[in-house]
Amino acid sequence: MIRELRDEDIPAVARIWRDLRPDAMHSVNGLGHLLGSSGSIEAVATVLCLRHEELHPVPAGSDVDPELPVSLVLDRPLPLPGVKAAISTSLAFGGSNAALVFSRWTNA
C-alpha cells in the first residue's frame, strides 16, 4: 500500500495544504528506495514534469491509503497545461528532510 509519508509527516503535510489535496506523483513505487540519491531523482522527475507539463502516474496496481493528504496520480499521466511551479519533497530516514520549489524558466 502506498503510504510513503510516515505517521508524523501526515499531519504536517495536512496542515500545509489544508483542504487542497494537491495532485502528487510518487516515484518510489516505480524506482524503489534509492536512499541518498532519491532526493536528486525526485528533483529531476519534478523538473521533467514541469517541462512536459504533466505528472507521471503511480505504477498500476498500487493500493493507495485514502488518508493521504494528497491526491496521487493513478493509471495515466495528468496533463498540467500552463503549470508554472512544482515542489519536490524528500522526507528521508532520520529526519533529514528537504523541499525544493522549481519554476518554469521564462525569458523576461
Image (tube, rainbow, N blue to C red):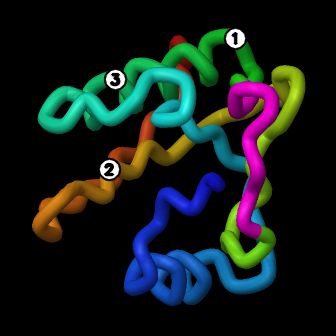
Cα–Cα gap, marks 1 and 2: 22 Å
Foreground of the two, 36 or 102: 36
Examine the structure image and report whether residue 62 is included in the region drawn in magenta. yes
**Quadrant in the picture for the N terminus:** bottom right
Image point (11%, 66%), residue name: 94
Image point (72%, 66%), residue name: 65
* Residue 81 in sight here: no
Earlier-in-chain disc, 1 versus 2: 1
Identify whether 75 is placed above or below 106. below
Earlier-in-chain disc, 2 versus 3: 3
Image point (65%, 34%), residue name: 84
The x and y percentages for residue 51 are: 61, 12
Identify whether 101 is placed above or below 48. below
Residue depth check, mark 1 versus mark 3: number of the one nearer the observer: 3
- The residue singled out by tag 2 in the image is 90
The x and y percentages for residue 78 are: 85, 29
The x and y percentages for residue 90 are: 32, 50
Image point (44%, 82%), residue name: 7
* Residue 78 in sight here: yes
The x and y percentages for residue 68 are: 68, 70
Extent of the magenta region: 57-65
- Indicate the secondary structure of the residue bearing disc 1: helix
The answer to which image quadrant residue 6 occupies is: bottom left
Identify whether 10 is placed above or below 61. below
- The residue singled out by tag 3 in the image is 41
Q: Which residue type does callout 3 highlight? A: Ile
Numbered circle sitting on residue 52? 1
Horizontal side of residue 98 vs 23, given as left or right = left
- Indicate the secondary structure of the residue bearing disc 2: strand
Foreground of the two, 58 or 77: 58
Q: Residues within 10 Å of mark 3 (few under 14, many from 20)?
A: some
